[in-house]
Amino acid sequence: MSKYLPSLLLFVTTSSVANIYWQPVEQTHSSGHGRQAKQFQLMGEQPEFSSVIEFIHSDLVSAPLDKKNSIVTLKPTGKDSYHALVARQKSDDFQSLAVRYIYNNGRPVSTSPSDLLAVELGGLQIIPSPLPREHWRYESLKTYNFNVVLDGTPLADHPLLATTTLGSNKVVHTDDEGRVQLFIPEDFPEIVPLKRATPAAELQLFSAVEKDGVTYEASLTTAYHASETSWKSVSLGAGVAFAGIVFGFVINRRLPEHSRRKVK
């Protein structure tokens, strides 16, 4: 398995990634608090292989999806909780899997996010452990757990490449149980001092392995937001600066007029 580490390290120094992976399509407007249609683009497709796409609902019902120019449109399912957007490319000696978990609002379902994560998709898979709870999101300056499995079996001491669309990258390894702890860096170039006002960035996880003559690839992507501590510290700094201006103005108004006159 270690022979794939040079390939993962190569990803760090190049702009191209061999794996297929999902990325969001920027939309000009949105509304409905999670009920509007969402679009995602499948990147890194290898033209010699066809792509099979499915959308697994939160109640574990699976629906096939068609794409146009590598873009899929996800209409509201009317079901609450996490859904899984899955893409596969495969041949006799190659399997590639791209997964993205998407939260939708709707009517409650009897299943849980843990049930969705337990769905065995086959081949190599990167699985959150667990997914963020409702109304929570991935944030910088926090550590999250992921499992790397091959056909349901954990891979020990296996490399995983973590990259962000803001330029951070790191190769980490799983422990003896196939779990990896990943710290998301604070790499936002600018943080707006309002909750979630800073545009989200993308976290991209990639891995690969070869077994019995078959090459397996896997990706998991998700949005992440600036840490709450970061935007609060920016807000505090702005508030202190503003308070200083106000305090100076008040003190200046209270000084005798001759003390406020400029010296000629």
Image: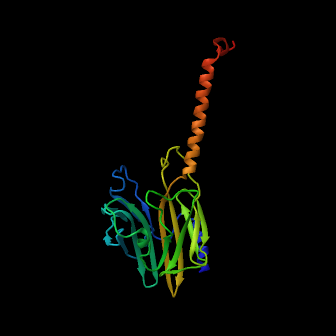
Q: Nearer the viewer, residue 19 or 253?
A: 253
Q: What residue appears at the point 58 percent right and 41 percent down from the top-left corner?
A: 236
Q: What residue appears at the point 59 percent right and 32 percent down from the top-left corner?
A: 243
Coloring applied to the structure = rainbow
Up the image or down, 235 lies above or below 16; here it is: above
Q: Check the picture and name the quadrant holding the N terminus.
A: bottom right
Q: Which residue lies most toward the right here?
A: 263
Q: Quadrant of residue 39?
A: bottom left
Up the image or down, 110 lies above or below 194; here it is: below
> Relative to residue 218, is residue 109 drawn left or right?
left
Q: Position of residue 44 (x, y in %)?
A: 45, 68
Q: What residue appears at the point 51 percent right and 64 percent down from the top-left corner?
A: 204
Q: Quadrant of residue 234?
A: top right
Up the image or down, 113 lies above or below 255; here it is: below
Q: Check the picture and name the quadrant holding the C terminus.
A: top right
Q: Nearer the viewer, residue 43 or 264?
A: 264
> Relative to residue 167, is residue 64 drawn left or right?
left
Q: Position of residue 143 (x, y in %)?
A: 58, 62
Up the image or down, 109 lies above or below 251; here it is: below
Q: Position of residue 118 (x, y in %)?
A: 44, 75
Q: Is residue 34 visible?
A: yes
Q: Nearer the viewer, residue 102 or 47?
A: 102
Q: Quadrant of residue 113?
A: bottom left
> Relative to residue 14, is residue 21 drawn left or right?
left
Q: What residue appears at the point 60 percent right and 19 percent down from the top-left corner?
A: 253
Q: Is residue 189 visible?
A: no
Q: Nearer the viewer, residue 135 or 189?
A: 135
Picture mark count: 0
Q: Position of residue 203 (x, y in %)?
A: 51, 61
